[in-house]
Amino acid sequence: MTDIGRIIKQARDQARLTALDFANGIFDDFIELHGDRNFRDDGAVIGGIGRLDNQPVTVIGIQKGKNLQDNLKRNFGQPHPEGYRKALRLMKQAEKFGRPVVTFINTAGAYPGVGAEERGQGEAIARNLMEMSDLKVPIIAIIIGEGGSGGALALAVADKVWMLENSMYAVLSPEGFASILWKDGSRAMEAAELMKITSYELLKMGVVDKVIAERGHFASELLGEIRSQLIEELADLQQLSTEELLEKRYQRFRKY
């Protein structure tokens, strides 16, 4: 197996830590909140409030399941529009109360079903992009597995974007890229090489700001390291005025 094949396999591993694992393992007293106050609660998106070094933080994540039954409940980590609207509701609540936002992203992409399209999947993603670009509190996004297309970007318009070492972040899946470009999904690994989807490649290009090493880590060590880095990074971001924060975020995405 090529190195990129190994990374893709690990990024998609069902045994990988989920967004809820990070929420409960990094933040104290995490309380999950539900629903978009419009249609229903989407199990593919989790969110709530926890404490980080005694500071309240809004935590949002895209949740994959750990087995078949759990994946069915979580729609295999593919959010519906109500999932993104739940996330936005919690982000606007965070803005109201001055809480920073931390997001954990692991999705092959937003759900492409008919019902999702009928309920405005594209609009929900676009609104999140617009609202996050102007959210008046610090935002840190962490890619913890797959970061697929607009489904991932809808939670990744952040002041800082980090990736776990064995994660991937791309405009679409390698299989989808190969199917579109060559009409041959079996050339996915070849497509992945062209796409530059791995953490260190994206760090080199400036798409992400930090890569968090995974090799040799037990879960507790990885969670502890991310907790320490979040405390330090949020302290730095909170030193900025609102105007400075928004301008830096704007310039970060303008450079692409």
Image (tube, rainbow, N blue to C red):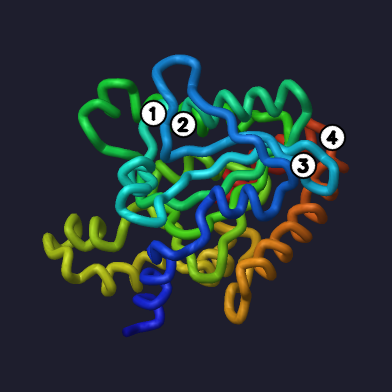
Q: Is residue 33 above or below residue 156?
A: above
Residue under pointer 2: 84
For the residue carrying disc 3, how many other residues have a C-alpha within 10 Å: few (<14), some (14-19), or many (20+)? some
**Earlier-in-chain disc, 2 versus 3:** 3
Identify which residue is drawn at 29% across, 28% down: 116
Judged from the image, the secondary structure of the residue bearing numbered disc 4 is: loop
For the residue carrying disc 2, how many other residues have a C-alpha within 10 Å: few (<14), some (14-19), or many (20+)? many
Residue furthest left as drawn: 183
The span from disc 2 to disc 3 (Cα, nearest Å) is: 23 Å
Q: Which of the 4 image quadrants contains residue 212? A: bottom right
Identify which residue is drawn at 39% across, 25% down: 123
Q: For this view, does 61 lie left or right of residue 77?
A: right
- Label 2 or label 4, whichever lies nearer to me, is 2
The span from disc 1 to disc 2 (Cα, nearest Å) is: 5 Å
- Label 4 or label 1, whichever lies nearer to me, is 1
In percent of width and height, residue 170 lies at 40, 56
- Label 2 or label 3, whichever lies nearer to me, is 3
In percent of width and height, residue 159 lies at 67, 45
| Disc 2 to disc 3: CB gap under 8 Å | no
The span from disc 3 to disc 4 (Cα, nearest Å) is: 22 Å
- Label 3 or label 4, whichever lies nearer to me, is 3
Q: Is residue 145 above or below residue 90?
A: below
Residue 81 is marked as 1
Residue 51 is marked as 3
| Disc 4 to disc 1: CB gap under 8 Å | no
Q: For this view, does 153 lie left or right of residue 191?
A: right
Judged from the image, the secondary structure of the residue bearing numbered disc 1 is: helix
Q: Is residue 154 above or below residue 136?
A: below
The kind of residue on which mark 1 rests is: Pro
**Earlier-in-chain disc, 2 versus 4:** 2
**Earlier-in-chain disc, 4 versus 1:** 1
Residue under pointer 4: 241
